[in-house]
Amino acid sequence: MTHHLHLLVEQLDRATEKALASAEALGPRAYVAPVPGKWAAAQVIHHLLTTEQRIVQALRKSLLAGADTWRLGTLKNRLRSLLLRLALRLPGLRFKVPPLLAPPPAAEDIAPLPELREQWASIRRQLEQLLNEFPGHKLRHTVFRHPRAGWLTVGQTVTSVLDHTLHHQQQLNRITKTLKS
Protein backbone atom coordinates (compact mmCIF):
# COMPACT_ATOMS: atom_id res chain seq x y z
CA MET A 1 0.00 0.00 0.00
CA THR A 2 1.36 3.40 -0.92
CA HIS A 3 1.86 6.10 1.71
CA HIS A 4 -0.99 8.12 0.20
CA LEU A 5 -3.42 5.17 0.38
CA HIS A 6 -2.27 4.44 3.93
CA LEU A 7 -3.05 8.04 4.97
CA LEU A 8 -6.48 7.80 3.31
CA VAL A 9 -7.24 4.58 5.21
CA GLU A 10 -6.19 6.24 8.48
CA GLN A 11 -8.57 9.14 7.76
CA LEU A 12 -11.28 6.64 6.87
CA ASP A 13 -10.70 4.79 10.15
CA ARG A 14 -11.13 8.03 12.11
CA ALA A 15 -14.28 8.98 10.18
CA THR A 16 -15.74 5.50 10.67
CA GLU A 17 -15.01 5.58 14.39
CA LYS A 18 -16.68 8.98 14.70
CA ALA A 19 -19.78 7.78 12.81
CA LEU A 20 -20.07 4.68 14.97
CA ALA A 21 -19.51 6.67 18.17
CA SER A 22 -22.23 9.15 17.13
CA ALA A 23 -24.73 6.34 16.66
CA GLU A 24 -23.66 4.48 19.81
CA ALA A 25 -23.98 7.66 21.90
CA LEU A 26 -27.70 7.65 21.13
CA GLY A 27 -28.16 4.29 22.84
CA PRO A 28 -31.53 2.71 21.98
CA ARG A 29 -32.57 5.91 20.18
CA ALA A 30 -30.09 4.98 17.42
CA TYR A 31 -32.93 2.81 16.11
CA VAL A 32 -35.49 5.63 16.17
CA ALA A 33 -36.04 7.83 13.11
CA PRO A 34 -35.78 11.53 14.03
CA VAL A 35 -38.94 12.18 12.00
CA PRO A 36 -41.20 9.76 10.11
CA GLY A 37 -39.81 8.81 6.71
CA LYS A 38 -36.19 9.65 7.61
CA TRP A 39 -33.40 7.24 8.47
CA ALA A 40 -32.49 6.31 12.02
CA ALA A 41 -28.80 6.50 12.97
CA ALA A 42 -28.54 2.69 12.82
CA GLN A 43 -29.84 2.78 9.24
CA VAL A 44 -27.15 5.31 8.31
CA ILE A 45 -24.47 3.04 9.81
CA HIS A 46 -25.94 0.03 7.98
CA HIS A 47 -25.90 2.00 4.70
CA LEU A 48 -22.26 3.03 5.16
CA LEU A 49 -21.22 -0.51 6.01
CA THR A 50 -23.13 -2.01 3.06
CA THR A 51 -21.69 0.56 0.66
CA GLU A 52 -18.12 -0.14 1.75
CA GLN A 53 -18.77 -3.87 1.53
CA ARG A 54 -20.02 -3.51 -2.07
CA ILE A 55 -16.96 -1.43 -2.98
CA VAL A 56 -14.60 -4.03 -1.47
CA GLN A 57 -16.38 -6.74 -3.50
CA ALA A 58 -16.03 -4.67 -6.68
CA LEU A 59 -12.32 -4.00 -6.04
CA ARG A 60 -11.73 -7.71 -5.37
CA LYS A 61 -13.49 -8.56 -8.64
CA SER A 62 -11.34 -6.00 -10.46
CA LEU A 63 -8.14 -7.45 -9.00
CA LEU A 64 -9.20 -10.97 -9.95
CA ALA A 65 -10.02 -9.86 -13.51
CA GLY A 66 -6.43 -8.70 -13.85
CA ALA A 67 -4.70 -5.36 -14.24
CA ASP A 68 -4.41 -5.77 -18.01
CA THR A 69 -8.17 -5.08 -18.29
CA TRP A 70 -7.92 -1.68 -16.54
CA ARG A 71 -7.83 1.62 -18.40
CA LEU A 72 -5.60 4.55 -17.63
CA GLY A 73 -7.57 7.29 -15.88
CA THR A 74 -8.36 10.36 -17.96
CA LEU A 75 -8.92 14.02 -17.23
CA LYS A 76 -12.65 13.30 -17.46
CA ASN A 77 -12.31 10.69 -14.68
CA ARG A 78 -10.43 13.18 -12.51
CA LEU A 79 -13.04 15.90 -13.06
CA ARG A 80 -15.93 13.58 -12.26
CA SER A 81 -14.14 12.42 -9.12
CA LEU A 82 -13.59 16.04 -8.09
CA LEU A 83 -17.27 16.86 -8.70
CA LEU A 84 -18.25 13.87 -6.56
CA ARG A 85 -15.97 15.11 -3.77
CA LEU A 86 -17.48 18.58 -3.93
CA ALA A 87 -21.04 17.27 -3.95
CA LEU A 88 -20.42 15.02 -0.96
CA ARG A 89 -18.73 17.81 0.99
CA LEU A 90 -21.45 20.43 0.48
CA PRO A 91 -23.50 20.65 3.68
CA GLY A 92 -27.18 19.86 3.37
CA LEU A 93 -26.96 18.38 -0.12
CA ARG A 94 -28.87 15.10 -0.21
CA PHE A 95 -28.90 12.22 -2.68
CA LYS A 96 -31.15 9.26 -3.30
CA VAL A 97 -29.59 5.84 -2.76
CA PRO A 98 -28.44 4.56 -6.18
CA PRO A 99 -30.67 1.77 -7.57
CA LEU A 100 -27.74 -0.67 -7.39
CA LEU A 101 -27.78 -0.37 -3.60
CA ALA A 102 -30.97 -1.23 -1.77
CA PRO A 103 -32.07 1.19 0.94
CA PRO A 104 -31.35 -0.01 4.46
CA PRO A 105 -33.85 -2.32 6.13
CA ALA A 106 -36.27 -1.07 8.76
CA ALA A 107 -34.43 0.10 11.86
CA GLU A 108 -35.82 -2.74 14.00
CA ASP A 109 -34.38 -5.29 11.54
CA ILE A 110 -30.82 -3.98 11.79
CA ALA A 111 -28.28 -5.83 13.93
CA PRO A 112 -27.08 -4.26 17.20
CA LEU A 113 -24.44 -1.56 16.76
CA PRO A 114 -21.63 -3.64 18.39
CA GLU A 115 -22.27 -6.32 15.75
CA LEU A 116 -22.22 -3.70 12.97
CA ARG A 117 -18.93 -2.40 14.40
CA GLU A 118 -17.42 -5.90 14.14
CA GLN A 119 -18.70 -6.37 10.59
CA TRP A 120 -17.30 -2.99 9.57
CA ALA A 121 -13.90 -3.80 11.10
CA SER A 122 -13.82 -7.02 9.07
CA ILE A 123 -14.72 -5.17 5.87
CA ARG A 124 -12.02 -2.58 6.59
CA ARG A 125 -9.41 -5.32 7.05
CA GLN A 126 -10.47 -6.74 3.67
CA LEU A 127 -10.10 -3.30 2.10
CA GLU A 128 -6.62 -2.90 3.58
CA GLN A 129 -5.62 -6.35 2.32
CA LEU A 130 -6.81 -5.46 -1.21
CA LEU A 131 -4.90 -2.18 -1.09
CA ASN A 132 -1.77 -4.07 0.00
CA GLU A 133 -2.18 -6.40 -2.99
CA PHE A 134 -2.84 -3.58 -5.43
CA PRO A 135 -0.14 -3.28 -8.12
CA GLY A 136 1.75 -0.03 -7.55
CA HIS A 137 2.29 0.59 -11.26
CA LYS A 138 -1.50 0.63 -11.83
CA LEU A 139 -2.45 3.39 -9.38
CA ARG A 140 -3.50 5.69 -12.23
CA HIS A 141 -5.79 3.09 -13.79
CA THR A 142 -9.54 3.00 -13.22
CA VAL A 143 -10.75 -0.01 -11.24
CA PHE A 144 -14.16 0.87 -9.79
CA ARG A 145 -17.32 2.16 -11.44
CA HIS A 146 -19.07 4.60 -9.12
CA PRO A 147 -22.85 4.81 -9.74
CA ARG A 148 -22.71 8.60 -10.11
CA ALA A 149 -19.12 9.55 -10.97
CA GLY A 150 -18.23 6.69 -13.31
CA TRP A 151 -14.82 5.02 -13.37
CA LEU A 152 -12.41 5.84 -10.53
CA THR A 153 -8.83 4.93 -9.70
CA VAL A 154 -8.15 3.06 -6.46
CA GLY A 155 -7.14 6.31 -4.71
CA GLN A 156 -10.26 8.08 -5.93
CA THR A 157 -12.34 5.11 -4.80
CA VAL A 158 -10.97 5.18 -1.24
CA THR A 159 -11.38 8.97 -1.21
CA SER A 160 -15.02 8.57 -2.28
CA VAL A 161 -15.61 6.13 0.62
CA LEU A 162 -14.10 8.69 3.00
CA ASP A 163 -16.17 11.54 1.56
CA HIS A 164 -19.30 9.38 1.68
CA THR A 165 -18.68 8.62 5.36
CA LEU A 166 -18.09 12.30 6.15
CA HIS A 167 -21.24 13.22 4.20
CA HIS A 168 -23.29 10.86 6.35
CA GLN A 169 -21.60 12.17 9.51
CA GLN A 170 -23.45 15.41 8.80
CA GLN A 171 -26.67 13.38 8.69
CA LEU A 172 -25.78 11.66 11.98
CA ASN A 173 -25.15 15.09 13.52
CA ARG A 174 -28.61 16.25 12.39
CA ILE A 175 -30.23 13.08 13.77
CA THR A 176 -28.47 13.55 17.11
CA LYS A 177 -29.50 17.19 17.31
CA THR A 178 -33.14 16.33 16.54
CA LEU A 179 -33.33 13.45 19.01
CA LYS A 180 -31.66 15.40 21.83
CA SER A 181 -33.93 18.43 21.53
Image (tube, rainbow, N blue to C red):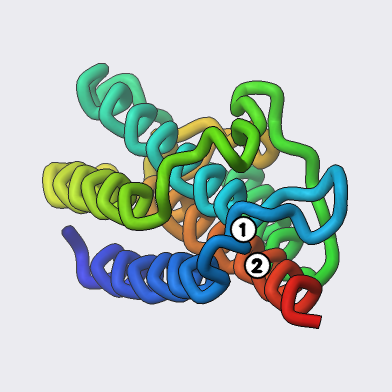
Q: What element carries label 2?
A: helix
Residue found 31% across the figure and 65% down from its top: 9
Residue 159 visible somewhere in the drawing? yes
Q: Which mark is residue 172?
A: 2
Outermost residue toward the front in this view: 28
Residue found 62% across the figure and 22% down from its top: 100
Residue 73 visible somewhere in the drawing? no
Residue found 34% across the figure and 37% down from its top: 56
| Horizontal and vertical percent position of residue 145 | 53, 31
On the image, which quarter does residue 60 sit in?
top left
User: Label 1: few (<14), some or many (≥20) within 10 Å?
Assistant: many
Q: Foreground: 175 or 73?
A: 175
Label 1 to label 2, Cα distance in Å? 6 Å
Q: Mark 1 points at which residue?
A: 41
Is the residue 110 above or below the residue 12 in the image? above
User: Label 2: few (<14), some or many (≥20) within 10 Å?
Assistant: many
Q: Label 1 sits on what residue type?
A: Ala
Q: In which quarter of the image is the N terminus?
A: bottom left
Q: Residue 112 carries which label?
A: none
| Horizontal and vertical percent position of residue 105 | 60, 31
Q: Label 2 sits on what residue type?
A: Leu
